[in-house]
Amino acid sequence: GAGVSQSPSNKVTEKGKDVELRCDPISGHTALYWYRQSLGQGLEFLIYFQGNSAPDKSGLPSDRFSAERTGGSVSTLTIQRTQQEDSAVYLCASSLTGKGEKLFFGSGTQLSVL
Amino acid sequence: GENVEQHPSTLSVQEGDSAVIKCTYSDSASNYFPWYKQELGKRPQLIIDIRSNVGEKKDQRIAVTLNKTAKHFSLHITETQPEDSAVYFCCYSSASKIIFGSGTRLSIRP
């Protein structure tokens, strides 16, 4: 596609429910990143996928968070048993090789946990 | 551990003056240092980057400097304009992932 696509753009859920956030990177980009941005804050690294290598999950805040990337393309970030502190914008980015180059960001998913 | 400290958190300058944002990182293996600009309600966009084999890079009104020995790098914006108002993030690469600083909110006073 023309850019990184994320869906949904907005998600409102109740505390305790599970949510799935989707990221469709730029075609041909082998590296994919998930970040979380709380209101007025910086970007918190969550997870990084590079080709067929094992993902770097060092930024996931708890075992309620998981992500997968199928076929080296689309990625899904899953948050189980959502809590109010999970409310944030979840940003996905991709880059061509993941070796020190420009990140292309999606427009993000605004998650609100009530 | 992986950490990058960014200062100041907020910065207000008169239009036409210069703005400087400074960052310090911890991972001595880092070799790539990008800067991202995020306008209100928009996604971050790369504005300039520098690699560890150079000490300075300039692109029109924006320049970055890198001191690998001290683990410091800085962003300099000259002749600031209203459209420079945004949040700026310094970043560095750590084991290929990109770590972001906490951001500097830059405001340009008319």
Image: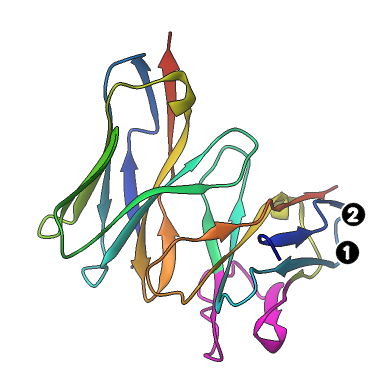
- What amino acid type should be assigned to the residue bearing mark 2? Glu
Q: Position of residue A93 (x, y in %)?
A: 58, 63
Secondary structure at badge 1 equals loop
Is residue B21 visible in this depiction of the protein? no
- What amino acid type should be assigned to the residue bearing mark 1? Lys
Which stretch is magenta? A47-76
Q: Are marks 1 and 2 in contact (CB under 8 Å)?
A: yes
Q: Is residue B42 above or below residue B101?
A: above
**Label 2 Cα neighbours within 10 Å, binned few <14 / some 14-19 / many ≥20:** some
Label 1 and label 2 in one chain: yes
Task: Tell me, yes or no, whether the highlighted magenta stretch contains residue A61.
Answer: yes
Q: Is residue B44 above or below residue A51?
A: above
The furthest residue to the left: B69
Secondary structure at badge 2 equals loop
Chain for disc number 2? A
Task: Tell me, yes or no, whether the highlighted magenta stretch contains residue A29.
Answer: no
Residue ID for mark 1: A17
How is the rendered protein coloured? rainbow
Residue ID for mark 2: A14
Q: Is residue A21 left or right of residue B64?
A: right
Residue B23, label in figure: none
